[in-house]
Image (tube, helix red, strand yellow):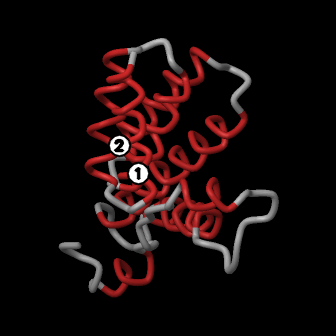
Amino acid sequence: MGDIVELERHAEAAYANGRSEEASRLYRDLVEQIPGEALYWYRLGNALVRTGRQDDAAIAYQQCLKLDPGNGKAWHNLGLVRLHQAQVSFAAGVQNSDSGDRVFDESLKLSTAVFSLIAPAPGPQAGADAGEARQVERRRVEPAGAKAATGSGAGR
C-alpha cells in the first residue's frame, strides 16, 4: 500500500508542476494497479487532455464514470473532450471539401459554432475552484472556414 501512496504523490506532483506526460504515465500505472479507483481514472483523463490525447482522455473519463456515475466533473470534462473532437471533425470536413458544397457550408457553420463554445473564456471559470479550473486545458483547432475558403488553410 505504501508504494501506491508514493506513486499517487508523485503523480499529483507531476500534474501540479505541469509535467503532464509524466503524470499521465504515473496515473496509468495507478489505474493498472487499482482499476476500480474512479479518482485515478479521472485524473488520468485530466493529464491526457493536457497532452492533447483527447481520444484516450475520453476513454479514461468513461471508465471513471462507469465506476462513479455521479461524478459531475468527469461528465463535464467528457463533454469538453467530445466538443473538441466534434470541432476537429467539422474543421476536417471544411478542409476536405470544396467551397460552396453543402458539406463545406454545414461543416464550416458547425465548426465555428463549436469553436465558440470551447474557446477559452477570459478569467477563471465561474464555480470552479482554483485546482479544478486548471485541470482541463482545452486544446482546440481553429475553425478552418476562412482559411479553407481562401485556400490558405490547406496543408494544416
Circle 1 sits on which residue? 13
Q: Which mark is residue 81?
A: none
Where residue 34 appears, x then y in whole percent?
40, 15
Residue 151 vertical position relative to residue 134 in the rendered view, above or below: below
Q: Which quadrant: the N terminus? A: top left
Residue type highlighted by circle 1: Ala
Question: What is the count of numbered marks?
Answer: 2
Q: Secondary structure at mark 2?
A: helix
Circle 2 crowding by C-alpha within 10 Å: few under 14, some 14–19, many from 20: some
* Residue 154 position by quadrant: bottom left
Please, which residue is most extreme toward the right here? 127
Residue nearer the viewer, 72 or 105? 72
Where residue 45 appears, x then y in whole percent?
45, 39
Q: Is residue 41 left or right of residue 68?
A: left
Q: Is residue 87 left or right of residue 50?
A: right
Please, which residue is most extreme toward the left here? 155
Residue nearer the viewer, 110 or 136? 136
Where residue 63 appears, x then y in whole percent?
49, 21
Circle 1 crowding by C-alpha within 10 Å: few under 14, some 14–19, many from 20: some
Residue type highlighted by circle 2: His
- Contact between marks 2 and 1 (CB within 8 A): the answer is yes
* Residue 29 position by quadrant: top left
Q: Which quadrant: the C terminus? A: bottom left
Q: Residue at the location (41% across, 40% down)?
A: 9
Circle 2 sits on which residue? 10
Residue nearer the viewer, 3 or 83? 3
Q: Is residue 156 left or right of residue 117?
A: left
